[in-house]
Image (cartoon, grey):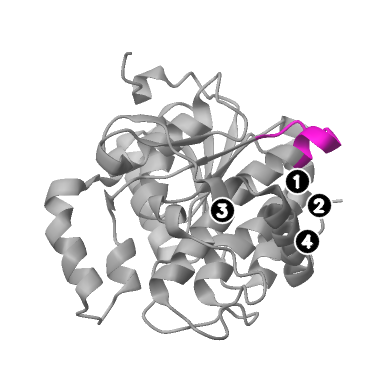
Amino acid sequence: MQTWTTNDIPDLSGKLAIITGATGGLGLETALVLSAKGAEVVLAARNPNKGAEAERLIRARHPAAHVRFDLLDLGDLASVAAFADRHLAAGRPIDILVNNAGVMALPTRQTTVDGFEMQFGTNYLSHFALTGRLLPLLTQAQARVIQLSSVAHRSGHIRLDDLNSTTGYSPWSVYQQSKLAMLMFAIELQRRSDAQGWGLTSVAAHPGFARTDLITNGHAGEPGLFARGARLLEGVLSHSAADGALPILMAATLPNVAPAGYYGPTGFQEMKGPPGVAVIKPQARDAEVARRLWAESERLTGVRYG
């Protein structure tokens, strides 16, 4: 089978793509490629200075790029609502939404502005709220919606009795839950789109072990076993952020993408390698847990999909 590359991405002129966390790492690599293919790209992130730098970088490589920064702080649902309201007021249908931004394995429990545990709130709940608020524009374009999961979902469990980890906080297990939630969100969104006639194509992707600042940011100041182990394994099992973005780009642009599909590297343990179909663990397909998680997410965020 021929390996998929960015050369296989069709022309995206006239398409609007929104990428969260697009001022660095996987999000920026995704934005670079989509811009090169002609899409209008919105860099949705919380740091205007980094946004300006990302815009300059993309335009330096692709002078004809249509790219702009738009403020979005996923640690604050008011910022999510304001971002969505700006786009709803503009009325431009959204063709591609990449819910990429996230934090990883914070050493101590932290909370968002709204009091949610930081990893669950940032990685999952705010993306749930963002997608729901943008739903009218997504349905108009019959959009492709991509959720960023991780190989970490394999050991994840949804703690429906304590989603915000008010007791028994564990950095890694909480991260696993957030990434399992993202994969379940992708599958459940497709179910609901089919039932309600929204016309969405909902998929998920993961980057494998990509060399980004995610681990550094998550373990800042923590000389622990995980951080040391990650550095030791990096040279053997990891690949670049650009390679890590390939499954995301495949999920976002493959013409015959599988609805509720999951894409990632196809090498050893899906850590790196050419992009392709990834393994979904059984707990991610639990429809009853997904239904309950969806209901609780609507309650916590105040965003209802109708």
Residue 209 placement (x, y as % from top left): 29, 50
In the rendered structure, which disc, 4 or 2, sits on the residue that comes first in sequence?
4
- Marks 2 and 1 in Cβ contact (< 8 Å): yes
In the rendered structure, which disc, 2 or 3, sits on the residue that comes first in sequence?
3
Residue 83 placement (x, y as % from top left): 66, 59
Residue 208 placement (x, y as % from top left): 33, 46
Q: Residues within 10 Å of mark 3 (few under 14, many from 20)?
A: many
Quadrant of the rendered structure where residue 172 is?
bottom left
Q: Tag on residue 305? A: 2
Q: Residues within 10 Å of mark 2 (few under 14, many from 20)?
A: some
Name the kind of residue labelled 2 in the image.
Answer: Tyr
- Residue on which the image places disc 4: 295
From the viewer's perspective, tell me whether residue 292 is left or right of residue 255: right
Find the magenta span and give its range.
Answer: 192-201
Distance in Å between CA atoms under marks 2 and 1: 8 Å
Distance in Å between CA atoms under marks 4 and 3: 15 Å
Dot 3: element: helix
Residue 135 visible, this angle: yes
Q: Tag on residue 135? A: 1
Name the kind of residue labelled 1 in the image.
Answer: Leu
Q: Residue furthest top?
A: 1
- Marks 4 and 2 in Cβ contact (< 8 Å): no
Q: Nearer the viewer, mark 4 or mark 2?
A: 4
